[in-house]
Image (tube, coloured by chain):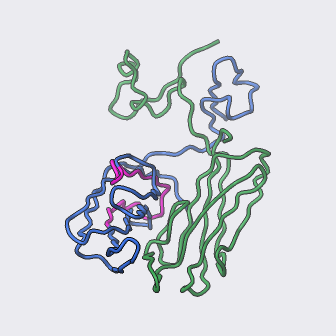
Chain colours: A blue, B green
Amino acid sequence: MKLIIAKPTFNALTETDPDNLQFSSEYNTLKYATQGTIQLAVNQATYYYSEHIDFPSMWLYYQYAYTSIDHNLGYKPFFAGYAIDNPTGYSSPLPYFDAGGGIFWIAVNMYVDSTKLYVMASYVTDQNSGTVNFDMSYRIFKNELDI
Amino acid sequence: MSGLFVISKSSIDAFDALESPVDPNDFIIHSDYSTFKILADGKLLSQTVSGAPTTFSVAHGLGYIPNFFSFCEFPDGKTAMNGQFSYDFTGHSPTVVGYGYFLAEADDTYLRFLVYKNSGASNFNVDIKYFIFEVEL
């Protein structure tokens, strides 16, 4: 037995193109498990590497930090993430890679395993003090990656 | 003939939720809104990465560039999205820590998955999962 809802002007009894259907029980969909926000604070005094460059003469500090939340699904789920008001002033889907705002390059990434969702920020700056906060929004779906 | 088919979320009365203004977030299914249908999914397991990049291809046979998402599990046990370094990646000269980088791309025939091994890493295996959704790019 099938449940099919066609888009307006299409016949649910005969239409087979999924783009012309609002819903079809023959196709799986993403199913929400949970959503939320995560803040990652980077203490820039704990940079993992530094180097001096000559042109222009300055020190560069390599920053790297991560945090995680529990999802407790017991498997690796389909997920998506977004950087909210990132250091260059915009919001972006993850992974996010950019430069600007006193940052030479920045990568913000998101990962999962069977118990946790992780976020990581890695960037290079001329700053070696203070705290930079990253706000991330995430969506976790019940669909299993099964890898 | 047109009609309306809705399934509201638990604790939400479907009839109440249909009163204006309608919030689609109140519904599990609402026939006025199309669902994001998964046309196909698949996985490539224990694929050996020996270069920068090593490329793995899957023929999708759709004849158009599909809307797709993909994920790659590196040996560190963390699963990355398309366009990400492995979890433990920290890069600077002369030492690069971590396995590498995952990138996926498509044309109207293939999905291609490129996994870059950093210069300091030995060969390693990855697992890749992909989902193809409706509506071509």
Q: Residue at x 51, y 64 (%)?
A: B84
Please determine whether, in this image, residue B74 is positioned above or below residue B10. below
Task: Name the image quarter holding the C terminus of chain A.
Answer: bottom right
Tell which residue pokes out farthest to the top in this image. Answer: B1
Along the viewing direction, whichever of A42 and B39 lies nearer the viewer? A42
Quarter residue B91 falls in: bottom left
**x, y percentage for residue A80?**
46, 52
Residue B51 included in the magenta stretch of the image: no
Residue A73 included in the magenta stretch of the image: yes
Q: Residue at x 60, y 44 (%)?
A: A28
Task: Name the image quarter holding the N terminus of chain A.
Answer: top right
Q: Residue at x 41, y 63 (%)?
A: A106
Q: Is residue A10 left or right of residue B30?
A: right
**x, y percentage for residue A55?**
41, 73
**x, y percentage for residue B45?**
64, 71
Along the viewing direction, whichever of A53 and B41 lies nearer the viewer? A53
Image mark count = 0
Quarter residue B136 falls in: top right
Tell which residue pokes out farthest to the left in this image. Answer: A130
Please determine whether, in this image, residue A96 is positioned above or below residue B65. below
Along the viewing direction, whichever of B22 and B115 lies nearer the viewer? B115
**Which stretch is magenta?**
A67-88
**x, y percentage for residue A136?**
34, 53
Q: Residue at x 46, y 59 (%)?
A: A97
